Each structure stands twice: as C-alpha cells, then as structure tokens.
C-alpha cells in the first residue's frame, strides 16, 4: 500500500513537470503544425539560468530565505526563456513559414544543438548541483513520504495549468490563439495579428518551460547542459500520447507518462523477476507510448485530423 | 460622387501566372456592386488582394481615401473592410457565439458589441437556437448565415462577399440574399462576387464582368442584364 502511494506521488510530481513542458510542444504544434524540437533545450536553459542566479545569490547573501532565492532564479529564468523562445521563432521559424514542412523541422533540430552547445560553453559539461537552499522537510502520509519540493511542484503546476486553461478558454488572447490554430487566414480577416499571436504562443510555452526546468533541477538536485534532450523527448511523447495540438491531452499525457514511469520503475523488477531493474523506466515509458499509438494514432484525446488547442 | 473603395490597375499573379490584370473598379458608400465571371476568372484573387490576404503584383487599392495596398489583412480588417471568404471560413471548433465574438475581435466598445449581437440574433434566429453548438456541425446554409452575422459584428463600412450562394439550395440562397439586402439597407456597402449572375445583377446597382482576369464590361446592373453578350455568357440564353 505505501509503495503504491509512494509511486503515485512520485509519478504525479514527475508527470506534472512533463505536462508543463508538453504544453509548450502542443501549443506551438496546434498553431503552426510545427514540432519545436528546441523546446526541451529552452527547459534546460531555464534550469541553467535559474541555477546560476540561485548559486550566485546563495554565495552572496547566505542568510536569504530559500524561497526568495528560488523566486529570484525564476524571475530571471522566465524572461530569459521567453526572450529565447521569441528569438527562435523570429529567426529560425518565421522565415520558413511557407517552406515545405521538413525545413523548419530540421531548423528546429539545429537550434536545439546550438542551444546545447551554448549551454556547454557557458556552464561546462559537468553536472551543476542545486544549492541546498530549500528546507528539506519530509511529511509522511499513510506510510508514503512527500517533500516540500514535491508539494510545491504539484501546487504550482496545477495552478499554472488551470490558469492556462482559463486564458485559452476565456480571454481575448485565448480566443485569438484558438482562431489562429483553426485558420490563420480567417483569423487575420477578423483583425487578429497572427504574427503576434504566434509570438505570444511561443512566449507562453517558453515561460512554462522555464518553470518546468527549475522544477526538474530542484527535484533531482542538479542540472546539466544535456538534460533538455531526454526531458524534451519525453514531454513531446507525452504531448503525442495525449493527442498533439490538444491542451488537455498534453496535461493528461504528461501525468500518465509520469505515472507510467514511476510505477514502471517501482514494479518492473517484480514483474520481470528481477531481470530488468528500475533503470529501465525510460524504455518502459516509450514502450507504453508506442503501444497506445498503435491503437490510437491520434493520441488519447486527439481527434482524427487533429483537434486544436 | 465620393468613393469608398477604389481599385486601380490591380494585378495579381501566382508565380508566373497572371490571375488578375489591371483591374479597376469603384464602390461608393452604401452601394451594392457585383463582380461576375466564370470559374477561374480571378474573382477570389481580386477580393484577396483587396482585403490584404494576397500581395498584389501591381496597382493600388484605396479605402476611404487611404491607400491599403500591401497592408496586411488584419490592419485592413480593422479599418472597416470585412471579407466573408469563399467557403464561409467559420471556425469549426468554436461555438456559434464564439464565432460571432471573433467578428468583434478588433472592437472594444462593449455596449456597441452587445447591441450588434442582439441585432444579429434578431436578424438570424436560426443562430440563436444554435448559440452553443460548434460551428463545424452547422449546415452549409447555417454556416453562411454565421459568416454573415460574424461579419456584421465587425460593423464594417464595406463588406466583400465571395460567392455566398455557393452550394446552397434555392430556398437557402433566397434567405442568404435577404440578409445581405438587410445589411446593405443599414448603409453598409457591398462588393459581391457571384457565379449566379442573375441573382447578383438583380441584387446590385452596379456590376463588373470579369473574364480571364480582366474587366470586359461594366455598368449599371440593369443595363448589364439586358446586354446580349452577358445574357448569352452568364444568364444562360
Ligand atoms: N494559390 C494559387 N496558386 C496558383 N494559381 C492560383 C491560385 N489561386 C488561384 N489561382 C489561379 O488563378 C486564377 C484565378 O483564380 P480565382 O480563384 O481568383 O478565380 P475565381 O474567379 O474566384 O474562380 P471560382 O469561381 O472558381 O471561385 C485561376 O486560373 C486559378 O487557377
Ligand atoms: Mg472564387
């Protein structure tokens, strides 16, 4: 029972981070039908920038409360990632908007390699530890334990996702985003500045990625210039699992992937009689993904032909 | 006479193919003008170039005395020129009500928007019943009505209509044209593109005949409909 509950908690925490990153993939895909492969690297940049700020502050002002230091890290990482996302859209994707679809895809891969290398040049190849600024309190619930960091991740991620749903459903910008996703031409006939809406989509996705990057590094206690690759791949898979282009799908896909991974890691040893260990959790996640897609190619919540935002 | 829209020597090309050649036309405030022509004559291309969806190859477009040549579509729309595109262009995954609100996207006068919404629902009771339904699930005729209602929500001074009768049953065509006349009666100028030349000439005061991208005939609609060449080519005689 407590193992089950423990895996549930771990899975939900991990899954909500995946969901935040997956939302960035799915929003951009919904509007441009473009897979922004650089999105994982934006997440990595968020983690790296935040860690740089947090590390510097922890050294300069050791007495500062951890939450404040973390807040400062986020306050710098978010605008940096937003600027980066906007720059990438403007320089790498917009000029190719009418090019064959393979072109921006290849550019996206190029951009992600560039970002990895920039991060490696600035911060080096080593793992960067997350400074111990947060109170490491652990709470026990029915035999399972949950840390403050986990609670914070869950609350923050839930809050952000609810806000995003509200923005997309109820606000003028949200309506413009949905209209643009359904038809760029007709949206422009309504007076929607499509380029601004697309930029806003990249900005929102990048801000979510920054937050997710900080969450991951706080959760695992480290960051690395290559961390965006696997994280991005998993989040992209989560978006596909839920039905790419669909916001609720990205959230569902992210949570499911987190749960699958966590339960997979917890039980895979028992299931295979000790043949496979918990280090196979990634394989397990992708195995489930492939299985689902074989039976539902458009993803769990995707409509055939691709429902949008 | 003051002109609302004046198109001068407009040319549109796709790659090397000229779809519109040196087309000129004018629309006066509150006037109904039609542009008729066969498939591929360049009607849609003309409307797209006027509304900013396409960059013209040459020529100029002025709206209310201002040049809107090569202005992007969203800026043209905000000036009070609204295009209802070929095939209606409703947002299929939005409700009827949300589609109508998209029409008022560029406006911020809440009271005026509420007033116009009331008027659209009064004029188009079918939409009232289907307020919360997804636009993609409406019939073709209902979608055309929604597209017209949505255009009204922008409170335009010039409405460009691209084949509003396309694919509709005769009774529905009548209903759609009744609505168009009602909108025009409010003082909105209309530039109507139609293949149904008979209906277009009956509805409008002025007409232009387009062949292979160029205007071959122009004049009062009553004159055009008695012109032997027009009768032969477009009125099926
Ligand atoms: N995107 C495009 N690329 C290349 N050629 C095009 C394109 N759109 C239209 N054309 C060509 O331009 C010419 C005019 O097309 P247009 O759509 O303006 O005609 P139309 O009068 O609206 O015809 P219809 O009554 O069939 O709607 C046609 O020869 C068409 O093949
Ligand atoms: Mg046409």
Image (cartoon, coloured by chain):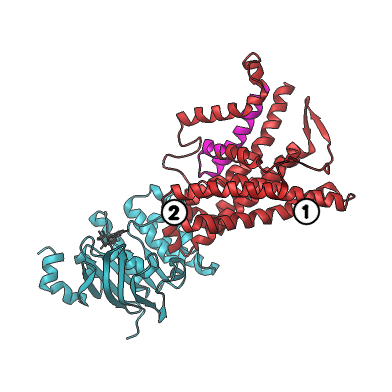
Residue A21 sits in quarter:
top right
Q: Along the horizontal axis of the image, is A94 left or right of B189?
A: right
Q: Is residue A271 above or below residue A127?
A: above
- For residue B1, say whether it is visible: yes
Residue B168 within the segment the image draws in magenta: no
Q: Is residue B124 above or below residue A6?
A: below
Image location (x, y in percent) of residue B79:
45, 73
In the image as oriented, which residue stretches furthest toward the right?
A: A63
Mark 1–mark 2 distance (CA, rounded to whole Å)? 45 Å
Q: Tell which quarter ligand 1 is in.
A: bottom left
Q: Residues within 10 Å of mark 1 (few under 14, many from 20)?
A: some
Image location (x, y in percent) of residue B54:
37, 65
Q: Are marks 1 and 2 in contact (CB under 8 Å)?
A: no
In-front residue for pair A180/B139: A180
User: Which residue is at 84% across, 40% downward?
Assistant: A135
Magenta-tinted stretch: A237-266
Q: Residues within 10 Å of mark 2 (few under 14, many from 20)?
A: many
User: Which residue is at 12% across, 68% downward?
Assistant: B231
Residue A259 within the segment the image draws in magenta: yes
User: Which residue is at 45% across, 40% downward?
Assistant: A303
| Colour of chain A as rendered | red
- For residue B124, say whether it is visible: no
Magenta stretch secondary structure, dominant? helix
Q: Are marks 1 and 2 on the same chain?
A: no
Q: Which residue is mark 2?
A: B96
Name the quarter where the N terminus of chain A is drawn: top right
Residue A251 sits in quarter:
top right
Secondary element type, mark 1: helix
Image location (x, y in percent) of residue B12:
31, 68
Q: Which mark is residue A72?
A: 1
In-front residue for pair A224/B194: A224
User: Which residue is at 32% across, 52% downward?
Assistant: B140
């Amino acid at each position: 029972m407590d193992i089950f509950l423990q895996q549930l908690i771990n899975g939900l925490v991990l899954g909500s981070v995946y969901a935040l990153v997956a939302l960035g993939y799915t929003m951009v895909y919904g509007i441009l039908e473009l897979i922004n492969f650089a999105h994982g690297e934006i997440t990595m940049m968020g983690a790296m920038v935040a860690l740089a700020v947090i590390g510097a502050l922890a050294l300069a002002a050791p007495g500062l409360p951890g939450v404040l230091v973390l807040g400062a890290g986020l306050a710098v990482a978010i605008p940096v990632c937003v600027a980066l996302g906007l720059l990438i859209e403007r320089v790498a994707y917009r000029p190719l908007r009418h090019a064959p679809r393979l072109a921006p895809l290849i550019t996206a891969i190029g951009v992600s390699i560039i970002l990895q290398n920039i991060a490696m040049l600035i911060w080096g190849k080593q793992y960067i530890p997350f400074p111990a600024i947060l109170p490491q309190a652990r709470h026990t619930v029915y035999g399972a334990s949950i840390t403050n960091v986990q609670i914070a991740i869950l609350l923050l991620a839930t809050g952000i996702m609810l806000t995003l749903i509200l923005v997309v459903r109820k606000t003028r910008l949200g309506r413009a985003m949905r209209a643009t996703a359904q038809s760029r031409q007709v949206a422009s006939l309504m007076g929607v500045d499509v380029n601004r809406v697309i930029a806003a989509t990249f900005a929102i996705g990048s801000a979510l990625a920054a937050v997710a990057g900080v969450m991951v590094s706080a959760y695992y206690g480290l960051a690395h210039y290559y961390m965006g690759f696997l994280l991005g791949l998993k989040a992209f898979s989560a978006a596909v699992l839920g039905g790419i282009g669909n916001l609720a799908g990205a959230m569902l896909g992210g949570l499911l992937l987190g749960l699958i991974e966590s339960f997979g890691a917890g039980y895979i040893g028992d299931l295979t009689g000790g043949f496979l260990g918990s280090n196979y959790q990634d394989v397990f996640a992708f195995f489930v993904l492939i299985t689902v897609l074989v039976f539902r190619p458009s993803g769990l919540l995707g409509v055939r032909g691709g429902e949008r935002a | 006479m003051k002109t609302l829209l004046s198109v001068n020597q407009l040319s549109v090309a796709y790659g090397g193919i000229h779809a519109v050649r040196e087309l000129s036309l004018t629309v006066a405030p509150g006037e109904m003008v039609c542009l008729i022509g066969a498939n591929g004559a360049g009607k849609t291309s003309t409307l797209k170039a006027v509304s900013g969806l396409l960059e013209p190859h040459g020529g100029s477009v002025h709206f209310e005395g201002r040049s809107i040549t090569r202005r992007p579509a969203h800026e043209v729309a905000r000036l009070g020129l609204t295009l209802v595109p070929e095939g209606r262009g409703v947002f299929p995954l939005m409700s009827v009500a949300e589609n109508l609100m998209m029409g008022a996207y560029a406006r911020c006068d809440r009271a005026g928007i509420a007033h116009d919404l009331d008027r659209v629902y009064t004029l188009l009771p079918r939409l009232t019943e289907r307020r919360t339904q997804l636009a993609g699930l409406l019939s073709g005729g209902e979608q055309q009505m929604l597209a017209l209602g949505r255009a009204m929500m922008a409170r335009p001074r010039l409405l460009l209509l691209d084949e509003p009768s396309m694919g509709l049953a005769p009774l529905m065509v009548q209903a759609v044209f009744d609505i168009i006349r009602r909108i025009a009666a409010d003082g909105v100028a209309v530039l109507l593109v139609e293949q149904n030349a008979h209906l277009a000439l009956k509805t409008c005061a002025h007409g232009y005949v387009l062949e292979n991208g160029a205007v071959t005939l122009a004049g009062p609609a009553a004159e055009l409909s008695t012109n032997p060449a027009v009768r032969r080519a477009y009125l099926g005689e």
